[in-house]
Image (tube, rainbow, N blue to C red):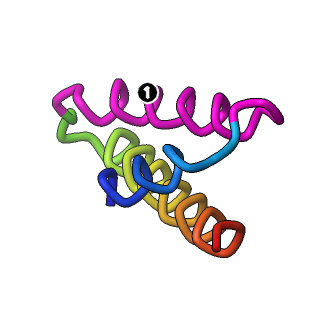
Amino acid sequence: MADDARRYAAVLPRSNGCGALAEVGLREADRRLSVRPRSTVRCIQNRARLIQALYSWLDRLAEVLP
């Protein structure tokens, strides 16, 4: 999923801010997902929400790009 998101983000124009915003989002997701998850319900729920948000974002990118 991350590779797909990076490919989409690479073709976004940076002049209107979409490309830069996508890059920031990808870096934040990389940072948050690189941390080893704790085995708490809260941590697992937060990770699941992040992954759901990434999939939603990827779907929106796929709709915007040709």
- Where residue 25 appears, x then y in whole percent? 55, 35
Residue positioned 58% across, 71% down in the render: 62
Q: Is residue 19 left or right of residue 3?
A: right
Seen from the viewer's position, the closer of residues 56 and 19 is: 19
Is residue 18 covered in magenta?
yes
Q: Is residue 46 left or right of residue 64?
A: left
The residue to which callout 1 is attached is 27
Decide: few, some or many residues near mark 1? Use Cα within 10 Å; few <14, some 14-19, many ≥20.
few
Magenta segment, principal secondary structure? helix
Is residue 39 covered in magenta?
no
Report helix, strand or loop for mark 1.
helix
Which residues are the magenta region? Answer: 14-36
Identify whether 2 is placed above or below 42. below
Residue positioned 20% across, 33% down in the render: 38
Quadrant the C terminus occupies: bottom right
How many numbered marks, from 0 up? Answer: 1
Which three-letter amino acid code belongs to the residue tagged 1?
A: Arg
Q: Is residue 66 left or right of residue 7?
A: right
